[in-house]
Image: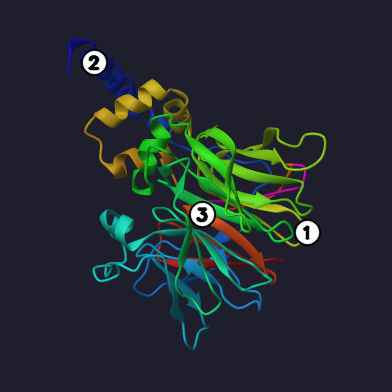
């Protein structure tokens, strides 16, 4: 390391040290949200036996489920209290050594299913596997079939979420980064990486079209009820972007909603409203780090562990926050578990049969909250 880099790193470290000493001034504390309801602590917990990280949730066309993907590469299905969780599908045929519930160093071999969506006409389940690309498996489950593993001649590095337009026979999906893989997600955020993409896959022609480039951690995807636009979560920027598919603004994009934290998946309910799960809210310290890419890149050069960098971003009390947005992007409702009594680091909220089904990429259970 040359003298310039040493000085640069020393300054950055000094800034961070000062920040850490100011914890009493709430640099870690996430912002409060006016009108928020502290209700998610009452959620029912459904444990995952021998599994962790139920990131996405889906119900099949018969209303059965939920189905969820877990960290060891399996997609599992809930069969009720009597039978519990059963295996449904896998995204990799190389399963011999995939025996640990959580083994990030094996994810590229075992697969890591993230976003899940059923085609209600065929019963096929479409899967965004972080390492193995866009895949599909039939109603009987088993080994999924790859559909898209590379775009523009380059392998997909971090396939994240998916939604289906059944009328047009196209699938919208995200690639979070062309530089970082899923197990490097903290590095992607703090470095200021903006190589994420929103893409469209045509099921009949098998062609892939890149709709948006330059996204900062492209994440959750959701179509509007009338299919006039598709939303994509831009996690690092704490916002949801709207890409217009129809009408006078077709082909253009704008900001649909600015959020007080890091959005993960987006799911539309039967009314056309959108539930957005926040991995965590953004503290003053996190805003400083993510707003200054030079500081973030310097942090990556310093001897911080993954856990320490993650704590810098989420800090304080990393509690659950679920935000419901209207079709115009206005906040309609905010539900939280402010003291993290039950839920935290949530990744998806699926509204089904009067309940919110809540996933998290970092815990060994699902949450189920009864709506009043």
Residue 221 position, x and y percent, is 60, 49
Residue 60 counted in the magenta span: no
Secondary structure state at the residue bearing disc 3: strand
Q: Mark 2 vs mark 1: which is more N-terminal?
A: 2
| Residue 181 image-quadrant placement | top left
Residue positioned most to the bottom: 82
Q: Which residue is mark 3?
A: 347
For this rendering, which residue is in front, 21 or 43? 43
Q: Residues within 10 Å of mark 2 (few under 14, many from 20)?
A: few
Q: Main secondary structure of the magenta part?
A: strand
Which residues are drawn in magenta?
A: 320-328
Residue labelled with disc 2: 5
- Which mark is first along the chain, 1 or 3? 1
Dot 1 falls on a residue whose secondary structure is loop
Image label count: 3
Percent across and percent down for residue 122 are 64, 73
Residue at point 25% right, 71% down?
96
Image: 252 above or below 53: above
Residue 323 counted in the magenta span? yes
Position of 205 compared to 29: left or right?
right
Earlier residue among tags 3 and 2: 2
Tell me the quadrant of the picture where the C terminus can be found.
bottom right
Where is mark 1, residue-wise? Answer: 271
Image quadrant assignment for residue 129: bottom left
Look at the picture and state if 251 lies above or below 333. above
Q: Position of residue 207 (x, y in %)?
A: 58, 49
In the image, is 35 to the left or to the right of 337? right
């Amino acid at each position: 390391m040359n003298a310039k880099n040493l000085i640069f790193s020393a300054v950055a470290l000094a800034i961070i040290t000062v920040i850490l000493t100011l914890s009493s001034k709430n640099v870690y504390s996430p912002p409060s949200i006016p009108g928020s309801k502290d209700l998610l602590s009452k959620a029912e917990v459904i444990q995952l036996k021998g599994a962790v990280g139920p990131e996405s949730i889906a119900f099949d066309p018969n209303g059965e489920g939920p189905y969820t993907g877990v960290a060891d590469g399996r997609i599992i299905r809930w069969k009720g209290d009597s039978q519990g969780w059963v295996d449904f599908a896998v995204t990799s045929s190389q399963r011999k050594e995939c025996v640990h519930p959580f083994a990030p160093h094996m994810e590229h071999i075992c697969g890591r299913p993230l976003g899940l969506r059923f085609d209600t006409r065929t019963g096929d389940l479409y899967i965004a596997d972080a390492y193995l690309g866009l895949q599909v498996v039939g109603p009987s489950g088993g080994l999924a079939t790859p559909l898209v593993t590379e775009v523009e001649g380059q392998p997909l590095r971090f396939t994240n979420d998916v939604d289906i337009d059944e009328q047009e026979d196209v699938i919208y999906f995200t690639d979070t980064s062309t530089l970082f893989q899923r197990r490097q997600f903290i590095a992607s955020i703090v470095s200021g990486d903006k190589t994420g993409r929103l893409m469209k896959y045509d099921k009949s022609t098998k062609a892939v079209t890149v709709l948006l480039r330059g996204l900062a951690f492209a994440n959750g995807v959701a179509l509007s009820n009338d299919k006039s636009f598709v939303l994509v979560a831009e996690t690092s920027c704490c916002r949801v972007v709207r890409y217009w598919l129809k009408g006078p603004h077709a082909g253009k994009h704008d900001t649909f909603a600015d959020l007080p934290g890091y959005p993960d998946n987006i799911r539309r309910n039967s009314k056309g409203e959108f539930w957005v799960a926040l991995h965590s809210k953004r503290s003053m310290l996190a805003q400083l780090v993510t707003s200054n890419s030079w500081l973030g890149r310097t942090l990556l050069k310093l001897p911080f562990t993954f856990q320490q960098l993650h704590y810098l971003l989420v800090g304080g009390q990393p509690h659950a926050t679920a935000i419901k947005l209207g079709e115009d992007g206005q906040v309609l409702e905010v539900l939280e578990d402010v003291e993290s009594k039950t839920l935290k680091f949530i990744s998806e909220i699926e509204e089904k049969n009067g309940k919110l089904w809540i996933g998290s990429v970092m815990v060994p259970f699902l949450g189920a909250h009864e709506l009043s």
